[in-house]
Image (spheres, rainbow, N blue to C red):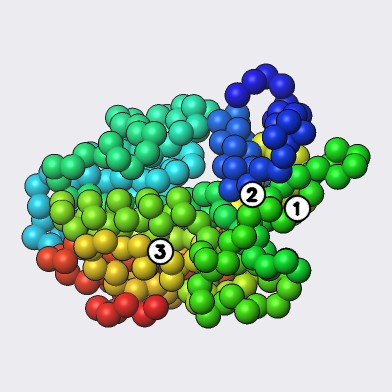
């Protein structure tokens, strides 16, 4: 990428060749954004950051994920060499907490991170010594069971949007207005043939959102789990039934901003379509999709918060508040979903039904 600001690069490209797809706009914006900074931080911290994630809210999240994986490994017969892999591991906080919980139960896996940001890799190296890094999932080890976690990973992948214009279905693109500001425009090419038949007659202005990159990654990972053994836990904010409308949003300094206002300078995300992820599963068993609150309650977050509070009485209020923020129905508990995959010959995971729920 040129040293020229990304916004100006996009303007020059659009003026030269015409509007660009939203997927390209989002993909290049996030690539620049994550490669140039540590975006994590709490709103009340002076260290700033643009957003926070569940592992940064409390150690309980990572610990419970680690115990969830350990329980599966134990009931699968405690295979010898095991790989722990994480997609987009942030600051390495989740992995650090999960690996500590695993080690206490005798599980010490090899650690592999899929992370493209040089800035975040440095932080992750400090959090988890010995972690090995990958640019994508295709180079993860293929000779051992894999325990894979993806927390708030799929939401940052570029989405493609189709809009029902007055002239039919078109791809939603990013163009320029007369003043050079970015704006959404409809593409020239008809797109009706790729719209699901049951949604083709939607009203004018309707938007359908897909994420081809998420489906491709899920196919690769699920086939890998089916062949090698292991499991995957995906946690993200999203939905489980098909819906219409744009879910694209941008966050900067813990506040929502216009997604087109500053490409490369804000975190761009979209709600994850868990039904589409489930449809992309290849070979592995989809054990269901539940809410984050259901997962954490089933794994004992309330008990864990109480135990930590008894060990540190002065922190009781903050611990209970963190547990409620993570699992409460009016907070992250219902907005965020958790999806589990396991190898066909591995046991069903804790908190999930043996049959898919979506």
For marks 3 and 2, give the one nearer the viewer: 2
Q: Is residue 336 left or right of residue 178?
A: left
Q: Position of residue 148 (x, y in %)?
A: 31, 51
118 shown above or below 189:
above
**Is 110 drawn above or below residue 203 in the view shown?**
above
> Closest to the observer: 4 or 89?
4
Q: Residue at x 45, y 43 (%)?
A: 88
The residue identified by callout 2 is 22
* Residue where numbered disc 1 is placed: 184
Which residue does the image show at 36% across and 46% down from the upper left?
86
Q: Secondary structure at mark 3?
A: helix
Q: Are marks 1 and 2 in contact (CB under 8 Å)?
A: yes
Calculate the distance from the C-alpha at mark 3 to the C-alpha at mark 2.
20 Å
What is the crowding at mark 2: few (fewer than 14 residues within 10 Å), some, or many (at least 20)? many
Can residue 110 be seen by looking at this rendering? yes
Name the N-terminal-most of marks 1 and 2.
2
| First-in-chain label (3 vs 2) | 2
Compute the Cα span from label 1 to label 2. 8 Å
Residue at left offset 27%, top offset 80% = 355
- The secondary element bearing badge 1 is classed as strand
Quadrant the N terminus occupies: top right
Badge 1 density bin: few <14, some 14–19, many ≥20, Cα 10 Å: some
Quadrant of res 159: bottom right
Q: Mark 3 — residue?
A: 277
């Amino acid at each position: 990428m040129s040293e020229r600001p990304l916004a100006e690069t996009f303007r020059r490209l659009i003026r030269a060749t015409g509007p660009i797809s939203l997927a390209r706009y989002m993909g290049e914006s996030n690539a620049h954004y994550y490669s140039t900074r540590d975006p994590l931080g709490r709103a009340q911290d002076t260290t700033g950051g643009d957003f926070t994630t569940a592992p940064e809210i409390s150690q309980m999240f990572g610990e419970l994920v680690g115990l969830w994986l350990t329980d599966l490994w134990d009931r699968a017969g405690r295979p010898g060499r095991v790989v722990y892999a994480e997609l987009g591991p942030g600051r390495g906080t989740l992995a650090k907490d999960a690996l500590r919980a695993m080690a206490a139960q005798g599980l010490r896996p090899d650690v592999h991170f899929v992370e493209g940001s040089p800035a975040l890799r440095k932080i992750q190296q400090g959090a988890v010594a010995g972690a090995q890094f990958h640019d994508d999932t295709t180079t993860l080890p293929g000779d051992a069971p894999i325990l894979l976690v993806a927390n708030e990973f799929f939401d940052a992948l570029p989405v493609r949007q189709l809009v029902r214009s007055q002239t039919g279905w078109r791809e939603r693109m990013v163009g320029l207005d007369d003043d050079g500001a970015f704006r959404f425009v409809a593409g020239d090419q008809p797109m009706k043939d790729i719209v699901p038949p049951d949604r083709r007659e939607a009203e004018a202005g309707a938007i359908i959102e897909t994420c081809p990159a998420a489906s491709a990654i899920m196919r690769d990972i699920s086939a890998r789990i089916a062949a090698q053994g292991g499991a995957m836990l995906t946690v993200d904010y999203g939905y489980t039934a098909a819906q219409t409308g744009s879910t694209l949003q941008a966050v900067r300094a813990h506040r929502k901003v216009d997604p087109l206002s500053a490409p490369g300078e804000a975190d761009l995300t979209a709600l994850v379509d868990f039904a589409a992820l489930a449809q992309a599963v290849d070979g592995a068993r989809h054990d269901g999709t539940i809410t984050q609150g259901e997962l954490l309650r089933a794994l004992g977050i309330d008990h864990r918060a109480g135990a930590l509070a008894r060990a540190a009485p002065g922190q009781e209020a903050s611990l209970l508040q963190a547990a409620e923020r993570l699992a409460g129905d009016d907070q992250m508990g219902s907005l965020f979903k958790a999806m589990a995959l396991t190898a066909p010959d591995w046991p069903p995971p804790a908190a999930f039904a043996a049959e898919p729920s979506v």
